[in-house]
């Protein structure tokens, strides 16, 4: 994964409806990002000699949203997410599974590189 700031657009899978968007930085094995209601922190590793990566992320809500229902928000504890994906010099796709309460949510995300983060 290239060290960069990316836009991220998430769509739930498995017949569930839900979407989310934000920005995320992948830099030297660290993931940091967020949107209007949530923030994300985590880590990743690139599989040597490939264009694939895997990692884990925790999502927490930073701002209450009485009129909105953020995709992974409304939880009193961090939402743990396992991710894996592929990347190019300018974009990435990522699949993940989030444990929200007692439910697993499967999602797919598309990332578009916005700026280098060297």
Image: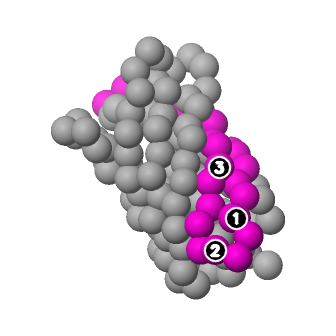
- Foreground: disc 2 or disc 1: 2
Residue that badge 1 annotates: 46
Say which of 85 and 63 sits in front.
85
Where, quadrant-wise, is the C terminus in this rendering?
bottom right
Q: Residue at x 45, y 65 (%)?
A: 93
Proximity of marks 2 and 1: CB atoms separated by less than 8 Å: yes
Proximity of marks 3 and 2: CB atoms separated by less than 8 Å: no
Q: Residues within 10 Å of mark 3 (few under 14, many from 20)?
A: some
Above or below: residue 106 compared with residue 32: above
Residue that badge 3 annotates: 55
Query: Disc 3 versus disc 2: distance between alpha carbons?
Result: 15 Å
Q: Residue at x 61, y 27 (%)?
A: 78
- Residue numbers of the magenta segment: 41-67
Q: Residues within 10 Å of mark 2 (few under 14, many from 20)?
A: few
Secondary structure state at the residue bearing disc 1? strand
Q: Estimate the x, y position of residue 67 in percent, counting from the top left.
A: 31, 31
Q: Residue at x 55, y 38 (%)?
A: 81
Q: Estimate the x, y position of residue 88 in percent, counting from the top left.
A: 54, 80
Query: Disc 1 versus disc 3: distance between alpha carbons?
Result: 9 Å
Mark seen at residue 50: 2
Above or below: residue 108 compared with residue 79: below
Q: Please tell me in which quadrant of the rendered image residue 61 appears.
A: top right
**Any part of residue 63 in sight:** no
Q: Estimate the x, y position of residue 107 in percent, counting from the top left.
A: 38, 45
Name the N-terminal-most of marks 1 and 3: 1
Q: Estimate the x, y position of residue 1 in percent, counting from the top left.
A: 65, 70
Q: How many marks?
A: 3
Secondary structure state at the residue bearing disc 3? strand
Question: Does 64 sit left or right of 70 as displayed?
Answer: right
Q: Does the segment drawn in magenta span residue 51? A: yes
Above or below: residue 27 compared with residue 103: below
Outermost residue, bottom direction?
89
């Amino acid at each position: 994964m290239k060290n960069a700031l990316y836009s991220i657009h998430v769509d739930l899978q498995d017949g569930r409806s839900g979407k989310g968007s934000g920005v995320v930085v992948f830099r030297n094995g660290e993931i940091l990002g967020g949107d209007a209601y949530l923030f994300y922190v985590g880590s990743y590793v690139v599989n040597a000699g490939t264009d694939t990566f895997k990692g884990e992320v925790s999502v927490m809500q930073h701002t209450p949203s009485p009129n909105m229902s953020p995709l992974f928000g409304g939880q009193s504890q961090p939402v743990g997410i396992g991710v894996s994906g592929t990347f190019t010099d300018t974009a990435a796709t990522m699949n993940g599974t989030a444990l929200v309460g007692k439910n697993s949510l499967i999602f797919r995300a598309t990332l578009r590189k916005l700026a280098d983060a060297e």
